Amino acid sequence: MEYADVAQEQREQRRKQRFAAKSTHMAQRYLRRMRELGGAMEQMEPFFSVLERVYVQGLDVERPCNAKTVGTYCVQVPQELIYAAGAQPVKLCSGHYTAFSIGDDVVARDACPLVKAIAGFEHMGTLPLYENCALMVVPITCDCKKRIAGLLRGRWPVHPLHVPANKDDEDVERYVADLYELMHMVSQVTGREVTYESLARALNLTGRAQYELSRFLRIKRSTPNLLRGTHAMAVMNASSYLDAGVWADAMGALNDELERRARANELVSHKDLPRIMLTGSPIVFPNLKIPLLVEEAGGMVVADETCMGERGMSDPVVPVDASFDGLMRSLAIRSLRPCPCPTFADNSQRIYRLRQMVRDYRVEGVIYHVLRGCVVYDFEYRLVEEELESMGIPVIRLESDYTDQDVEQLRIRSEAFVETIKLKKGPIKANRA
Ligand code: SF4
Ligand code: SF4
């Protein structure tokens, strides 16, 4: 090798080492803030640990039976198909600022930070979570996702999944056909055919995770101040990197503890704190700054309507009939019909779900989070604002980027919003402390 080539390689190596060190530091900082927030429970450790494993220790996810991993980028990709073909799905939407700063120079200036962070990891090639994927499944939902599919294709086999913009019968039919294609693609990668039995087993597996999630949401709804919303969001985010069965077991243990605490009235705060709901662009670890700022400002994030949070797994698969095709159809219907993502043309469903959540969680204020460049969510803000205002619920739009530079401005706005709700409620009632 020529001297100039060796020098170039060494420079590249040092650049990667610096990137890895900075990435680790950023993830560590957010994990520390989460733990320091107060109210974190021992039973949350398995969830925090997997975030630490992937983003601080830089290890790959644990894979039962050494299964291949398939990277996905949206909740509209049915994980059941991937499990049924003997692989493990991992969600690769990214909230990493260090990767974002690299991706910022790689993709279009106006792309959203989530996609820039994905591009950053792709470019640096240092994170085993990405590097070890045998296949990437990218849903074609918004322009940014479309572009990222092209970029990833240079390094991995990529399967673009064409998610329809509407949810009519013919759209569902087309989506079923696309899911069959996806099934064949994953089978080719793993060398294992999807059978009726393997698909049914996969449905049972994710069904167990959904059951524990529904238990978690029920407990959360019924007992105010039982846990911090930031911690709840971390628990949901961790499902991206854990086998669904492992996640369900850990959730079962957490739910048991939460039920015990609810009976003993062991709350994270005995004050009647402003009850805030988050909605809008995805909130992906380590970018938990919005829920952290709200809770550090004295609010309580009681619910989130985001796809990396409660929405990600909440809709169960209801088999339309007991045939193989019936199971495939059920997956397509579950992925499309209840999904309130604004990438769909008609969003009456999202409004309905938001209204329902406001009532269920007795929400007193809504923060509408918009990632810079995320036009699909930004576009919907006015409509959501009007609806919430008609219910007498204050709402603010917080635009953020994957950087610490906007933190102080976001802090001031979050604090002002929390104070406004406090004033509206009158003096805070404290049962104790
Ligand atoms: S915001 Fe919508 S399109 Fe984007 S990952 Fe979430 S569900 Fe998918
Ligand atoms: S929906 Fe928004 S956040 Fe998600 S990839 Fe598209 S532009 Fe980015």
Image: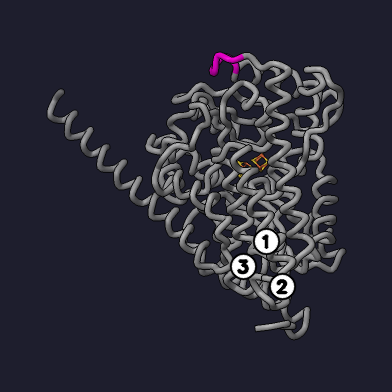
Residue appearing at x 40%, y 43% in the figure: 58
CA separation, marks 1 and 2?
17 Å
Q: Which tag is nearer the camera, tag 1 or tag 2? A: 2
**Callout 2, which amino acid?**
Pro
Tell me which label, 1 or 3, sits earlier in the chain: 3
Q: CA distance from mark 1 to mark 3?
A: 13 Å
Q: Residues within 10 Å of mark 3 (few under 14, many from 20)?
A: many
**Span highlighted in magenta in the image:** 187-192
User: Mark 1 Cα within 10 Å, few/some/many (few <14, many 20+)?
Assistant: some
Q: Which residue is mark 1?
A: 397
Q: Secondary structure at mark 3?
A: helix
The residue that disc 2 covers is 274
Camera-near label (1 vs 3) is: 3
At label 1, which amino acid type do we have? Arg
Along the polypeptide, which appears first: circle 2 or circle 3?
Answer: 2
For this view, does 306 lie left or right of residue 57? right
| Identity, as a three-letter code, of the amino acid under mark 3 | Val
The answer to the question of whether label 2 and label 3 lie on touching residues, with beta carbons closer than 8 A, is no
| Dot 1 or dot 2, earlier in sequence | 2
Residue receiving disc 3? 294
Residue closest to the far left = 3
Taking the spot 60% from the left edge, 30% from the top edge, the residue there is 138
Q: State the SS at label 1.
A: strand
Q: Is residue 189 magenta?
A: yes
